[in-house]
Image (spheres, rainbow, N blue to C red):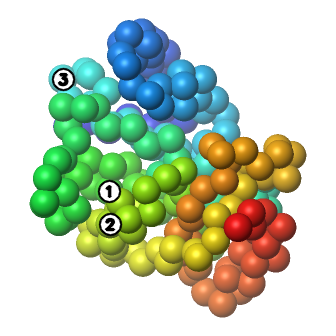
Amino acid sequence: MNIIDFVKNPQPNLWQRFLNDLARTDDHLKENYLNIDFDEFLTFPCVLDSEKIVCFSGLQYNENKWGQGVARCSSRMWIHPDYRIQGASKFAGGPKFLNTTYCLPMQLELAETMGINTLFISRESNPRAFSQYINLVKINCGIEFNIEPMRYNVCGHQHSPTDSCNQFVAVYHRDLDAKSNWIKNMSQHVVY
Protein backbone atom coordinates (compact mmCIF):
# COMPACT_ATOMS: atom_id res chain seq x y z
CA MET A 1 0.00 0.00 0.00
CA ASN A 2 1.11 3.55 -0.80
CA ILE A 3 -0.29 6.78 0.60
CA ILE A 4 -0.53 10.07 -1.24
CA ASP A 5 -1.74 13.29 0.36
CA PHE A 6 -3.83 14.89 -2.39
CA VAL A 7 -3.51 18.31 -0.71
CA LYS A 8 0.29 18.32 -0.77
CA ASN A 9 0.68 16.21 -3.89
CA PRO A 10 -2.33 16.57 -6.21
CA GLN A 11 -2.79 13.74 -8.67
CA PRO A 12 -5.46 15.01 -11.08
CA ASN A 13 -5.20 12.10 -13.53
CA LEU A 14 -5.41 9.48 -10.79
CA TRP A 15 -8.34 11.29 -9.17
CA GLN A 16 -10.17 11.61 -12.50
CA ARG A 17 -9.77 7.85 -13.12
CA PHE A 18 -11.28 7.24 -9.68
CA LEU A 19 -14.19 9.60 -10.41
CA ASN A 20 -14.86 7.94 -13.76
CA ASP A 21 -14.96 4.51 -12.11
CA LEU A 22 -17.13 5.76 -9.23
CA ALA A 23 -19.62 7.45 -11.58
CA ARG A 24 -20.37 4.04 -13.13
CA THR A 25 -21.19 2.41 -9.78
CA ASP A 26 -24.45 2.21 -7.87
CA ASP A 27 -22.83 3.58 -4.69
CA HIS A 28 -25.67 5.52 -3.07
CA LEU A 29 -23.17 7.98 -1.51
CA LYS A 30 -21.17 8.68 -4.66
CA GLU A 31 -22.38 12.30 -4.79
CA ASN A 32 -20.36 12.88 -1.58
CA TYR A 33 -17.18 12.10 -3.51
CA LEU A 34 -17.75 13.42 -7.03
CA ASN A 35 -17.26 17.09 -6.11
CA ILE A 36 -14.64 17.10 -3.36
CA ASP A 37 -12.85 20.44 -3.10
CA PHE A 38 -9.36 19.68 -1.82
CA ASP A 39 -8.97 23.36 -0.84
CA GLU A 40 -11.34 22.65 2.09
CA PHE A 41 -8.88 20.14 3.57
CA LEU A 42 -5.61 20.48 5.46
CA THR A 43 -4.69 16.94 4.43
CA PHE A 44 -6.45 14.34 2.28
CA PRO A 45 -4.61 11.00 2.40
CA CYS A 46 -5.46 8.43 -0.27
CA VAL A 47 -4.43 4.80 0.07
CA LEU A 48 -3.32 3.18 -3.18
CA ASP A 49 -2.98 -0.47 -4.05
CA SER A 50 -1.32 -1.00 -7.44
CA GLU A 51 -2.01 2.61 -8.50
CA LYS A 52 -5.71 2.23 -7.68
CA ILE A 53 -7.38 4.35 -4.98
CA VAL A 54 -8.81 1.99 -2.35
CA CYS A 55 -9.43 4.35 0.59
CA PHE A 56 -9.40 8.01 1.48
CA SER A 57 -10.56 10.57 4.02
CA GLY A 58 -9.50 14.06 5.01
CA LEU A 59 -8.96 16.60 7.76
CA GLN A 60 -11.36 19.43 7.04
CA TYR A 61 -10.96 22.84 8.68
CA ASN A 62 -13.45 25.66 8.19
CA GLU A 63 -13.70 28.41 10.82
CA ASN A 64 -16.89 29.72 9.20
CA LYS A 65 -18.62 26.39 9.83
CA TRP A 66 -17.16 25.21 13.14
CA GLY A 67 -15.17 28.08 14.63
CA GLN A 68 -11.50 28.46 15.37
CA GLY A 69 -9.59 25.39 16.55
CA VAL A 70 -12.25 22.84 15.51
CA ALA A 71 -11.64 20.39 12.64
CA ARG A 72 -13.51 17.45 11.18
CA CYS A 73 -11.41 14.36 10.64
CA SER A 74 -12.18 11.21 8.70
CA SER A 75 -14.26 13.50 6.48
CA ARG A 76 -15.52 12.11 3.17
CA MET A 77 -14.23 8.66 4.12
CA TRP A 78 -14.52 6.11 1.33
CA ILE A 79 -13.28 2.52 1.13
CA HIS A 80 -13.37 0.45 -2.04
CA PRO A 81 -15.99 -2.33 -1.71
CA ASP A 82 -13.31 -5.02 -2.15
CA TYR A 83 -11.46 -3.65 0.90
CA ARG A 84 -14.39 -3.26 3.27
CA ILE A 85 -14.46 -5.64 6.22
CA GLN A 86 -17.66 -7.64 6.68
CA GLY A 87 -18.94 -9.80 9.51
CA ALA A 88 -18.43 -10.15 13.24
CA SER A 89 -14.77 -9.11 13.23
CA LYS A 90 -15.74 -5.87 11.54
CA PHE A 91 -14.31 -3.53 14.19
CA ALA A 92 -11.71 -5.72 15.91
CA GLY A 93 -8.74 -3.54 14.97
CA GLY A 94 -5.57 -4.11 13.01
CA PRO A 95 -4.01 -2.99 9.72
CA LYS A 96 -6.79 -4.38 7.53
CA PHE A 97 -8.79 -1.27 8.50
CA LEU A 98 -7.32 1.11 5.95
CA ASN A 99 -8.75 4.43 7.12
CA THR A 100 -7.76 4.05 10.78
CA THR A 101 -4.39 2.54 9.85
CA TYR A 102 -3.25 4.96 7.14
CA CYS A 103 -5.46 8.04 6.72
CA LEU A 104 -6.64 8.99 10.19
CA PRO A 105 -3.17 8.89 11.87
CA MET A 106 -1.89 11.43 9.31
CA GLN A 107 -4.85 13.68 10.07
CA LEU A 108 -4.41 13.41 13.83
CA GLU A 109 -0.70 14.16 13.58
CA LEU A 110 -1.23 17.23 11.41
CA ALA A 111 -3.99 18.54 13.70
CA GLU A 112 -1.65 18.27 16.68
CA THR A 113 1.20 19.95 14.78
CA MET A 114 -1.10 22.82 13.81
CA GLY A 115 -2.46 23.24 17.34
CA ILE A 116 -6.00 22.19 16.47
CA ASN A 117 -7.28 20.97 19.82
CA THR A 118 -10.83 19.86 19.03
CA LEU A 119 -11.58 17.20 16.46
CA PHE A 120 -14.83 15.59 15.50
CA ILE A 121 -15.98 12.74 13.33
CA SER A 122 -19.54 12.65 12.03
CA ARG A 123 -21.97 10.27 10.37
CA GLU A 124 -25.47 10.73 9.00
CA SER A 125 -27.00 7.48 10.20
CA ASN A 126 -26.60 4.17 12.01
CA PRO A 127 -25.49 5.26 15.51
CA ARG A 128 -24.67 1.67 16.49
CA ALA A 129 -22.18 1.22 13.65
CA PHE A 130 -20.83 4.72 14.36
CA SER A 131 -20.18 3.72 17.96
CA GLN A 132 -18.30 0.63 16.77
CA TYR A 133 -16.27 2.78 14.39
CA ILE A 134 -15.35 5.18 17.20
CA ASN A 135 -14.17 2.16 19.21
CA LEU A 136 -12.04 1.10 16.23
CA VAL A 137 -10.47 4.58 16.17
CA LYS A 138 -9.53 4.08 19.84
CA ILE A 139 -8.06 0.63 19.11
CA ASN A 140 -6.09 1.58 15.99
CA CYS A 141 -5.19 5.22 16.73
CA GLY A 142 -5.14 5.38 20.52
CA ILE A 143 -7.43 8.45 20.56
CA GLU A 144 -10.73 8.39 22.42
CA PHE A 145 -13.59 10.28 20.80
CA ASN A 146 -16.83 10.67 22.76
CA ILE A 147 -20.18 10.47 21.02
CA GLU A 148 -22.40 13.46 21.71
CA PRO A 149 -26.01 12.72 22.71
CA MET A 150 -27.49 15.16 20.16
CA ARG A 151 -27.13 15.60 16.43
CA TYR A 152 -25.40 18.67 15.00
CA ASN A 153 -25.77 20.63 11.79
CA VAL A 154 -22.22 19.96 10.59
CA CYS A 155 -22.77 22.14 7.50
CA GLY A 156 -22.64 25.25 9.70
CA HIS A 157 -25.02 28.12 10.22
CA GLN A 158 -24.75 29.16 6.56
CA HIS A 159 -26.88 26.15 5.62
CA SER A 160 -30.36 25.25 6.73
CA PRO A 161 -30.31 21.99 8.64
CA THR A 162 -31.07 19.12 6.26
CA ASP A 163 -31.01 15.39 6.81
CA SER A 164 -27.54 15.15 5.29
CA CYS A 165 -26.27 18.03 7.48
CA ASN A 166 -27.82 16.79 10.74
CA GLN A 167 -25.31 14.20 11.89
CA PHE A 168 -24.18 12.20 14.87
CA VAL A 169 -20.81 13.46 16.10
CA ALA A 170 -18.00 12.09 18.21
CA VAL A 171 -15.61 14.66 19.66
CA TYR A 172 -12.03 14.61 20.93
CA HIS A 173 -10.92 17.50 23.14
CA ARG A 174 -7.19 17.76 23.79
CA ASP A 175 -7.86 19.65 27.05
CA LEU A 176 -10.56 21.52 28.99
CA ASP A 177 -10.03 24.71 26.97
CA ALA A 178 -10.73 22.71 23.82
CA LYS A 179 -13.94 21.36 25.36
CA SER A 180 -15.05 24.91 26.19
CA ASN A 181 -14.19 25.94 22.64
CA TRP A 182 -16.41 23.15 21.25
CA ILE A 183 -19.33 24.24 23.42
CA LYS A 184 -18.87 27.90 22.46
CA ASN A 185 -18.58 27.20 18.74
CA MET A 186 -20.94 24.28 18.24
CA SER A 187 -23.83 24.77 20.69
CA GLN A 188 -25.57 26.89 18.04
CA HIS A 189 -25.47 23.87 15.68
CA VAL A 190 -27.32 21.40 17.93
CA VAL A 191 -30.43 20.27 16.08
CA TYR A 192 -31.83 17.56 18.42
Q: Is residue 70 above or below residue 84?
A: below
Q: Is residue 58 left or right of residue 133?
A: right
The residue sitting at the bottom extreme is: 176
Label drawn at residue 132: 2
Mark 2–mark 3 distance (CA, rounded to whole Å): 30 Å
Q: Amino acid at mark 1?
A: Thr
Q: Is residue 128 left or right of residue 98?
A: right
Q: Amino acid at mark 2?
A: Gln
Instruction: Please name whichever residue, 135 or 63, is drawn nearer the observer in this view of the structure.
Output: 135
Label drawn at residue 50: 3
User: Which badge, 1 or 3, is on the more N-terminal residue?
Assistant: 3
Instruction: Please name whichever residue, 4 or 148, is drawn nearer the observer in this view of the structure.
Output: 148
Label drawn at residue 100: 1
Residue under the point 23% across and 52% down: 97
Mark 1–mark 3 distance (CA, rounded to whole Å): 20 Å
Q: Amino acid at mark 3?
A: Ser
Secondary structure state at the residue bearing disc 2: helix
Mark 2–mark 1 distance (CA, rounded to whole Å): 13 Å
Q: Is residue 84 above or below residue 13?
A: below
CB-based contact (under 8 Å), mark 1 and mark 3: no
Residue under the point 44% across and 28% down: 28
Q: Is residue 66 visible?
A: yes
Instruction: Please name whichever residue, 24 or 47, is drawn nearer the observer in this view of the structure.
Output: 24
Can you say which quadrant of the picture contains the C terminus? bottom right
